[in-house]
Amino acid sequence: MLITSLANCADQSVLEFDVCVVGAGAAGIYSAVRLANLGLNVGVVDAGPTETVAPDAVGYIAEFGDQFYNGAVDGRAFGFGGTTSRWGGVLIPHSNHDVRGNDEPCWKHISETVAREKRAVLVGLGAKNHDDFDRYPARLLPDVTGELSEVGIDMMASLFLPFRTKNLSTLARKCKANLSVYTDATASDWKIVDENVTSLRLRTLTRLEHEVRARWFILAAGTLESARSLLEIQAKYPGLLQSEILGRGLGDHLSTAVASVDVSDGKRCLDLFAPRFERGWMRSFRFLDRNQNHQTRAFAHFVFDNRNAGFALAKKVLTSLQARRVPKLRIAEIVTGLAGVSGLAYSRYVRNRLHIPQSTDMKLQLDVEQPFDPSNRIVLSNATDGYGRRRLIINWKIGDHAATQIDRIADEFVRRWNRSKLPKLTRASVSLSGQKPHDAFHPVGACRLGPSEEYPVGFDLSVNTVRNLSVLCTGVLPTAGSANPTFSMLCLGEVLCRRIGTLIGN
């Protein structure tokens, strides 16, 4: 694999590939490696440098029309690895829990694709023996899953990528096929002739320009930037991309604590539901209400306010290393943290558990999707950024009814839970205050896939009316659904890569 900064290359260079992937985050790296392993010559381009940086460091400054959307700032990273340089590495699939009355054809397609492709994606990520998301809880905690099933709650197990592979740049670095990565240049202008992309103009912050020619292009720049590129194409070629919902429906998960665990049940709850390790991979538990009276999808999970000094030290060190940066530690942090490291090691390697002290405060967190709202949208500003591209205006808000909706879902969930013999929950008031509801940054909806040209992207992820341009980002999901979106996106990408391999493979 070759990594080159285009900021240091001669102006007007021409790059040629079988496939050009725009974006070096989870979607871009996974698809690029997959296509390279199929024998194609693949180039990946990204606006950031080799080490990931915040949006403003590469000249990406968004404007906000309604509420401030922190997913556009802290939820994005640019450079080799993208947001995988800072994410938690959670893998969990969308499923038939997501197939409900609204957007049923889209979610039916997504859930069926995920069910069919999940093992292939896990193999690609090095987790071939962990596709038991729905079976793991029943194998480990049969009595618990039985109790919950009787009251209409299903359990699933999420899977966390090991620390050493959370940053997917590692996946690309191990690739021995024909893969090249080009940094420090944005996709500034698309040339389309007869419904085919013939070339892509790249531009650096110093205004150097380069041209990319490829047989196929994949737009994998994340929800916001992928939508921006499609809106630029729509503005440049009137009548080509006629979808009126392009850029509309930007949504996320709204996440808040809705219940606490009774003090008398704290130890039992911790013993049952604390994250644990199996064959080096961490697993945690999710809870889904099987009653689908609510059109809005949601999932629940326990969160642990772990204030152990050793845990804080380990988290800071590992987070820095994941981003390929040297940790910056104070002497006091090291001294106080080392005292708790032995407990972490004992729990991890002897008990196969994540170390959480018994005094830790435990809450039930509810993640609820934002329903499709066309007024939550992305549009192009008249102002331009450092590359000469039109900035994004992000119109996003949490509707007035959101807290009421979450309260209603939480009331029913806690009522069902407390009918079981499991540790009792006490309802808490819902709070959506602050810039970021806890554990969000799951942007979806702005590049929705669908069965007709009403949608900007088809079920095969091709941009409608552009033959050799595909979109792979969480923005193709109609709403956030009942799971973190990255794994389902990669399952869709697995099908896309095989299709491209068949169409243009040597």
Image (cartoon, rainbow, N blue to C red):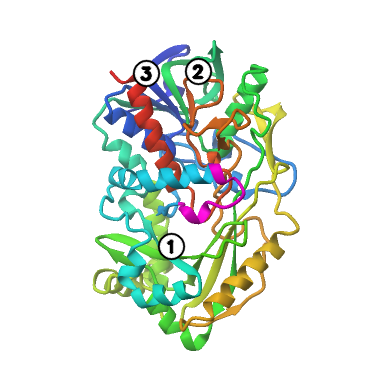
User: Residue at horizontal 28%, vertical 51%?
Assistant: 127
- Inter-mark Cα distance, 2 to 3: 12 Å
Mark sitting on residue 200: 2
State the residue lying farthest toward the bottom.
264
Q: Secondary structure at mark 1?
A: loop
Using the image as rendered, state which of residue 467 and residue 294 is in the foreground.
Answer: 294
Residue 501 place in picture, x, y as percent: 33, 25
Q: Residues within 10 Å of mark 3 (few under 14, many from 20)?
A: many
Using the image as rendered, state which of residue 254 and residue 466 is in the foreground.
Answer: 466
Using the image as rendered, state which of residue 26 and residue 146 is in the foreground.
Answer: 146
- Identified by mark 3, the residue type is Phe
Which quarter of the figure has residue 284? bottom left
Establish if 409 lies above or below 15: below
- Inter-mark Cα distance, 1 to 3: 47 Å
On the question of residue 150 being in view, the answer is: yes
- Identified by mark 2, the residue type is Leu
Residue at label 1? 330
- Identified by mark 1, the residue type is Arg
Q: Secondary structure at mark 3?
A: strand
The residue range painted magenta reads: 94-105
